[in-house]
Image: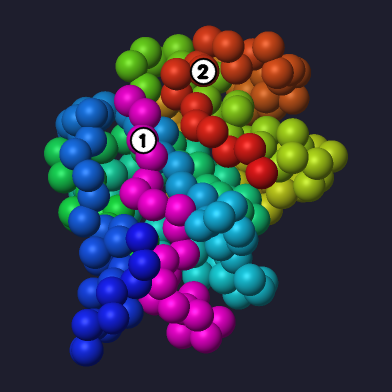
Amino acid sequence: MKKPKKPGFSEKTWFLTRVVIMPYRKIEFRAGHYYHLYDRGINRQPIFFCDDNWGYFIQRIRHYFQPELVDVVAYCLMPTHYHLLVYLKTDDLSKKIMQPFGLSYTKAINRQQGRVGPLFQGPFQAAWVDKDEYLLHLSRYIHMNPVVAGLVARPEDWIFSSYRDYIGLREGTLPIPDAVLAQFPSRQAYRTFVESYCEQDTKAIDHLLFDQDG
């Protein structure tokens, strides 16, 4: 899709036309359910360009993912994409949270980097976590992303995820891990569970994952 050349067609209007006005979704968002949210950079390019961007992204999450609307259960930021495991308290995830969140971060990055147009590949992807047991496997998958990608040797070495909060190495206020940790006798037991991960473990949650090759 080429960028329209109509006079006065602002970058914001272009972004809204190209990304924020989303096509019909097969998945329906409902309060009281868990969802895996994901998006990556356009053309699989980075979404973080300097050290400050990572912190700003977290700040944007804190701003738009308000406690009365949604709980962030687990998260992981990667150089080209992000994963969020959330519990909804509203039916309107797209308009109340994801659209302004994506637009806010993209506009800030475009100003900083002197770029125009969309930052993300397209509308965010989402999967309904339809069984409580899947929360465990999905949180492990999310926290092991940096290790599987070869960025770090241990999941706790990657500071841009909620894993350090889960195992007690950091007392962050963003993730609400109770639903996951309640299914383990201790944080150490959860740590053992995560670090025993192997690729076969994803078979049970294949329907909750997205194509992120590259």
Residue 66, image x, y percentages: 28, 55
Region in magenta: 104-128
Q: Residue 60: within the magenta?
A: no
Q: Look at 64% across and 56% down and name the residue there.
A: 79
* 8 is higher (above) or lower (below) than 66: below
* Residue nearer the viewer, 132 or 109: 109
Quadrant in which residue 10 is drawn: bottom left
Type of amino acid at the residue the image marks with label 1: Ala
Viewer-closest of 171 and 155: 155
On the picture, is 165 further left or further right than 37? right
- Residue labelled with disc 1: 126
Q: Position of residue 128 (x, y in %)?
A: 33, 25
Q: Residue farthest to the right?
A: 153
Number of marks present in the image shown:
2
For the point 45% across and 58% down, which residue is it? 120
> Could you tell me if residue 134 is visible in this image?
yes
Q: Camera-side residue: 141 or 188?
A: 141
Where is mark 2, residue-wise? 206
Amino acid type, mark 2: Asp
Give the quarter of the image for residue 107. Answer: bottom left
Left or right: 8 with respect to 145? left
Q: Quadrant of the C terminus?
A: top right
| Residues at marks 2 and 1, CA–CA distance in whole angstroms | 13 Å
